[in-house]
Amino acid sequence: MSAGRIRIAVATEDGITSDVNFGKANRFVLAEIDEGKITRKGEILSDSITKEDLGSGCHGHDKTYLENLAKELTDCSYLIVRHIGNFPFRVLKSNGINVLEQTGEIDELLIKIAAYVSK
């Protein structure tokens, strides 16, 4: 499945691990895999969600939020999250973003994806 440049977003609280459920995520690390080389490209901090706004709920079922986030992630082929519900999964998938439920250190997860896409 050899591919050219692949962009990936990872939902995270600490910037080190994939450790947050999609509906409560407001920070996404961006990375790029190009011919097996992995490069971090920055972060997206969602101004539309803060921990204070979330309380015990989430914005994972807010279609406007999901569409806006999909636009921000438009050039990403993959999104890695700890967990995601069916509705946000379908919205992101319909926008061309493949969602993977994974936890662990971001760098290790990126190595696994790089190996997968280079097959």
Image (cartoon, helix red, strand yellow):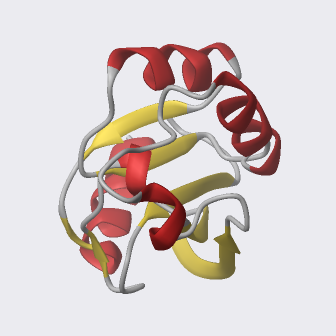
Say above or below: 95 vs 32: above
Looking at the image, which is closer to me, 113 or 56? 56
Horizontal and vertical percent position of residue 76: 67, 47
Q: Is residue 38 left or right of residue 96?
A: left
Horizontal and vertical percent position of residue 78: 52, 43
Query: Looking at the image, which residue is at 53% across and 61% down?
Result: 53
Looking at the image, which is closer to me, 113 or 14? 14
Horizontal and vertical percent position of residue 94: 65, 13
Looking at the image, which is closer to me, 7 or 44? 44
Query: Looking at the image, which residue is at 49% across and 46% down?
Result: 79
Q: Is residue 22 left or right of residue 97?
A: left
Asked whether residue 118 is in view, the answer is: no
Say above or below: 85 vs 77: above
Say above or below: 71 vs 88: below
The image quarter in which residue 33 lies: bottom right
The image quarter in which residue 27 lies: bottom right
Horizontal and vertical percent position of residue 98: 50, 30
Query: Looking at the image, which residue is at 71% across and 58% down?
Result: 48
Looking at the image, which is closer to me, 102 or 48? 48
Say above or below: 62 vs 36: above
User: What quarter of the picture does the C terminus occupy?
Assistant: top left
Number of numbered tags placed on the structure image = 0
The image quarter in which residue 108 lies: bottom left
Query: Looking at the image, which residue is at 36% across and 53% down?
Result: 113
Asked whether residue 115 is in view, the answer is: yes
